[in-house]
C-alpha cells in the first residue's frame, strides 16, 4: 500500500513564516489512536481525540496582532475559502458549531490530495476560489477564529478524504519520532514537550499576561521580589520541573516540583522577597529544566543584571 499511496504524495513546506522552537511550536499532532483515546505519531500525547491535523501555534496574542504570515505548504488550486469569522470568540465562550475551522482555505493539490488551513485571522485571507498558488505563496495571517483556544494555524492533509499524518504518512511506524519517510520537504522535528519562554521579573507574574505578550517589570535593586518564570508545553503527569537562581552575595534558590496533571501548556515560577537593603547589584543567573523519567528533556538558561 505504502508504495502506491505515497508515489504521488506532495512534499510540504512549513506553512507559517516562523521558526519552530523560537517564535512558534507544534501544539498538537494528528491523533493516531483509532479508539476514544489519543496518541500522536511519536507515541506521545500531544494531540486529542479525533484531531485531524497539525497545529502550528504562536507563543503570544501579540504575535497574532502583529501579523504572522500563513503560506501555501504545497502548490495547487484554491477550491474553497471562508473569512469574516471573529478571532477569540470560542475562547470567550461563544459557539463555533458548523464553523469549527473558522476562517479557512482548502487547496486541491491534484491526484486526490488536499490541504486545509484553519483559524486564520479575520479579514486576512488573500486568495479566492479558483486561484492557482505556488508553494510558499501568501494565503493570510495566523489567527484564532473558529474553534480555537489559542492563536495557531491548523493544517490538515487529506488523500481521497482520508486524513494523512505528514510525520508518518504510511501510518506504519509505531513511534515515528525519527521516521525515515515524512512529507516535509525540510525536516520538521517532532517535539513532544519543551520550554517556550522564560524570564526574570520583579512581581508575581500572571500566565494571562505572558500569553498576551505584555511586558513584565524587570528586576531592580528596589524591587519587592525576584521571580524566575517559565512557560512550556506538553507537561505530563510525573514530570519534574526545576528552577535555579544564583546571584551576588550568595543569593541562591534551587527548587523542584512535580507535574500533578498533563497539560498542553503550563506556567510555573519561583522567587523570593527582597533582602533587607534591597537586591545587591550584579549578575543573576537562572535555569529552568523539564525532566521525564529521570532525564532532562528541556532546559532554558538566562541572565539578568541589576545595576
Image: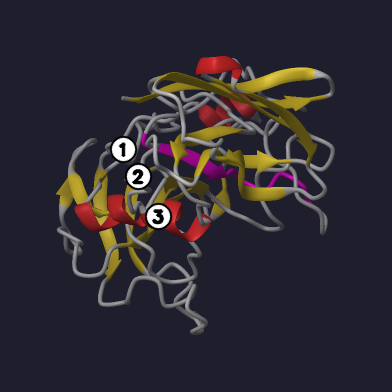
Q: Secondary structure at mark 2?
A: strand
Nearer to us of marks 2 and 3 is 3
Q: Which residues are magenta?
A: 23-34
Between marks 3 and 1, how big is the CA–CA gap? 11 Å
Residue at x 49% of width, y 70% of height:
147
Tell me the quarter of the picture where residue 258 sits.
top right
Residue marked by disc 1: 74
Residue 110 is labelled as 2
Circle 1 SS class: loop
Query: Can the viewer see residue 45 in this picture?
Result: yes
- Sequence-wise, which precedes: disc 1 or disc 2? 1
Labels 2 and 3 touching (C-beta < 8 A): no
Q: Which mark is residue 243?
A: none
Q: Nearer the viewer, residue 22 or 107?
A: 22
The C terminus sits in image quarter: top left
Q: Is residue 132 above or below residue 175?
A: below
- Across and down, in percent, residue 295 comes to 77, 17
Q: Residue at x 40, y 33 (%)?
A: 10
Are the residues tagged 3 and 1 within 8 Å (C-beta)? no
Is 25 included in the stretch rendered in magenta? yes
- State left or right for residue 101 relative to residue 104: right
User: For mark 3, does the 10 Å Cα neighbourhood hold few (<14), some (14 to 19), or many (20 or more) residues?
Assistant: many
Amino acid at each position: 500500500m505504502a508504495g502506491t499511496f505515497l508515489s504521488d504524495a506532495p512534499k510540504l513546506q512549513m506553512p507559517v513564516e516562523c521558526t519552530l522552537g523560537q517564535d512558534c511550536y507544534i501544539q498538537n499532532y494528528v491523533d493516531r489512536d483509532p479508539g476514544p483515546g489519543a496518541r500522536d505519531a511519536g507515541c506521545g500525547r500531544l494531540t486529542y481525540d479525533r484531531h485531524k491535523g497539525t497545529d502550528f501555534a504562536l507563543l503570544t496574542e501579540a504575535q497574532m496582532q502583529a501579523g504572522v504570515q500563513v503560506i501555501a505548504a504545497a502548490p495547487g488550486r484554491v477550491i474553497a475559502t471562508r473569512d469574516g469569522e471573529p478571532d477569540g470568540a470560542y475562547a470567550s465562550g461563544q459557539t463555533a458549531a458548523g464553523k469549527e475551522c473558522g476562517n479557512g482555505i482548502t487547496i486541491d493539490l491534484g491526484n486526490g490530495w488536499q490541504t486545509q488551513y484553519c483559524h486564520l485571522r479575520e479579514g486576512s485571507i488573500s486568495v479566492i476560489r479558483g486561484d492557482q498558488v505556488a508553494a510558499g505563496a501568501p494565503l493570510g495571517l495566523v489567527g484564532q477564529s473558529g474553534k480555537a483556544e489559542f492563536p495557531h494555524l491548523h493544517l490538515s492533509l487529506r488523500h481521497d478524504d482520508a486524513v494523512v499524518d505528514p510525520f508518518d504518512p504510511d501510518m506504519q511506524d509505531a513511534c515515528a519520532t525519527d521516521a525515515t519517510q515524512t512529507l516535509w520537504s525540510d525536516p520538521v522535528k517532532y517535539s513532544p514537550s519543551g520550554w517556550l519562554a522564560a524570564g526574570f521579573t520583579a512581581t508575581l507574574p500572571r500566565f494571562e499576561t505572558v500569553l498576551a505578550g505584555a511586558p513584565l517589570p524587570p528586576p531592580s535593586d528596589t524591587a519587592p521580589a525576584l521571580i524566575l518564570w517559565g512557560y512550556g508545553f506538553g507537561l505530563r503527569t510525573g514530570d519534574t520541573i526545576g528552577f535555579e537562581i544564583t546571584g551576588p552575595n550568595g543569593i541562591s534558590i534551587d527548587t523542584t516540583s512535580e507535574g500533578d496533571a498533563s497539560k498542553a501548556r503550563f506556567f510555573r515560577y519561583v522567587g523570593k522577597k527582597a533582602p533587607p537593603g534591597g537586591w545587591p547589584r550584579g549578575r543573576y543567573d537562572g535555569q529552568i529544566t523539564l525532566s521525564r523519567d529521570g532525564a532532562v528533556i528541556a532546559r532554558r538558561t538566562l541572565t539578568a543584571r541589576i545595576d
